[in-house]
Image (spheres, rainbow, N blue to C red):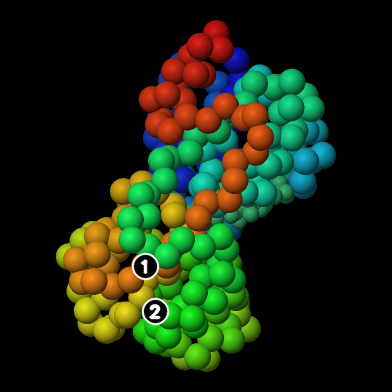
Amino acid sequence: MRVLLLGGTGEARALAKALHRHVDIVSSLAGRVPDPALPVGPVRIGGFGGVDGLKRWLRDEGIDAVVDATHPFAATMTAHAAEACDALRVPHLVLARPAWDPGAAIVVKSDAKAAEAIAEQGYSRIFLTTGRTGVGAFTGSDAWFLIRAVTEPDSASLPRSHQLLLSRGPYYYDDEFALLQTHRIDALVTKNSGGNMTRAKLDAAVALDVPVVMVARPPAPHGVKTVGSVNQAADWVAGLG
Ligand code: NAP
């Protein structure tokens, strides 16, 4: 039994740790982040070359099953894995951490809609945490942004008025509370990533009455089995025999 783990998340690393002694696994990372946190066991890095490239790779490597533990917003990879596995009849599971309860947040469908929402609401000092690729939707905004990302966004995508904070989670409540206060943030923009590594900003925003604009998750591919925890994913792999 040889299993591909599509990764780039803490859950994927935890699953690799749970499986690597008993199962022949290979983890895959996109290669976006310099010096990524590596899972235990064999790792390959870089795109497959679309659905056809992935199908070829799965055949060449003799992969018997795929667990897609990519980030809930990695929709292209998730769609490609679903299509390739369906075409090859390879068992396939999505491991997606549960979404956050948006509470009183303004929920929007895209980064562009989040930019519209902050303009409509007249927010002027924004903590923007939607990641490097999400910044482009805010380029034309008149607001000031504290932009937190793991890697630097393209300079052309940056809004006129901003400060860049390059860092990687996990983040903690006291630090997030202080960050919101120090920068006099009047709105937090976040994806609904779920999980505990980055949720402290939401709790701090609620405590400080800072409104939240939350980008909803992209829809999951149709008909794909999904679980919410590492243990459930490990059980699924064990059940493949
Ligand atoms: P994406 O838009 O869904 O994928 C774009 C392309 O990147 C895919 O078509 C694929 O290239 C390649 N790719 C993505 N994940 C890969 C993986 N695990 N292994 C090999 N190739 C992969 O993905 P994304 O949103 O840019 O995310 C990239 C990676 O960062 C993912 O692994 C994800 O788990 C991680 N991540 C994403 C976010 C986020 O907010 N999106 C946050 C934290 C971590 P080919 O078509 O050439 O195969």
> Up-down: is 184 above or below 199?
below
Q: Which of marks 2 and 1 is in front?
A: 1
Q: Which amino acid does label 1 sit on?
A: Val
Res. 19 in view: no
Quarter of the picture holding the N terminus: top right
Q: What residue type is labelled 2?
A: Ile
Q: Name the residue under label 1.
A: 212
Secondary structure beneath dot 2 equals strand
Residue 85 image point, x, y percent: 71, 28
**Tag count in the figure?**
2
Secondary structure beneath dot 1 equals strand
Residue visible at 28% across and 73% down in the picture: 210
For residue 93, which quarter of the picture?
top right
What label sits on residue 116 in the rendered view? none
Q: Observer-nearest residue: 136 or 28?
A: 136
Q: Name the residue under label 2.
A: 126
Mark 2 is surrounded, within 10 Å at the Cα level, by few (under 14), some (14 to 19) or many (20 or more) other residues, namely many
Ligand 1 closer than 8 Å to label 1 CB: no
Residue at far top of view: 241
For residue 86, which quarter of the picture?
top right
Quarter of the picture holding the C terminus: top right
Badges 2 and 1: C-beta atoms under 8 Å apart? no
> Up-down: is 231 above or below 149?
above
Residue 69 image point, x, y percent: 52, 38
> Up-down: is 33 above or below 154?
above
Residue visible at 65% across and 29% down in the picture: 223
Mark 2 or mark 1, earlier in chain = 2
Residue visible at 19% across and 66% down in the picture: 207
> Up-down: is 102 above or below 122?
above
Residue 227 image point, x, y percent: 47, 29
Q: Observer-nearest residue: 75 or 27?
A: 75
